[in-house]
Image: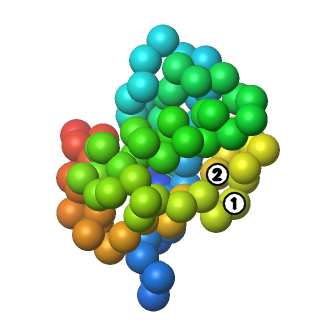
Amino acid sequence: MTQQKCYKVGMGGVSLQVKARPGARRDALAGTRGGELVVEVRARAEKGLANEAVRQVLADALGVPRAGVSLKIGAGSTHKVFLVPGEALPALARLYDSEKE
């Protein structure tokens, strides 16, 4: 069975499908599942706090500025789509390749 990629390259950057897990014990990437990058954050899912925490985790993990990570779909859902700059593509590819091993 082949693993579905959690990202798609487009004209405006890279669309990244994310499964957010608010209220976790740590802020970290937790792998990929079902075509989504799982991001755990300590912040609660209230008043946009978890969304901002997910943005920060993605920015740190992908080596891009937080301002370059924008939420496109799913502000009130655990299933989200973020847009990240094309410079994040090598980091995403490494993450995807390490998940396949």
Residue shown at the point (39%, 29%) measured from the top left: 28
Residue 46 shows in this picture: yes
For mark 2, what is the residue?
Answer: 80
Q: Are marks 1 and 2 in contact (CB under 8 Å)?
A: yes
Say what secondary structure mark 1 lies in. strand
Q: Residues within 10 Å of mark 1 (few under 14, many from 20)?
A: few
Q: Position of residue 9 (x, y in %)?
A: 42, 76
Closer to us: 9 or 25: 25
Q: Which three-letter amino acid code belongs to the residue tagged 2?
A: Lys
Please give left or right for residue 45 compared with residue 82 in the image.
Answer: right
Q: Position of residue 18 (x, y in %)?
A: 55, 48
Closer to us: 19 or 51: 51
| Residue farthest along the right direction in this orientation | 76
Within the image, what quadrant is residue 7 found in?
bottom left
For mark 1, what is the residue?
Answer: 73
Please give left or right for residue 96 compared with residue 46 in the image.
Answer: left
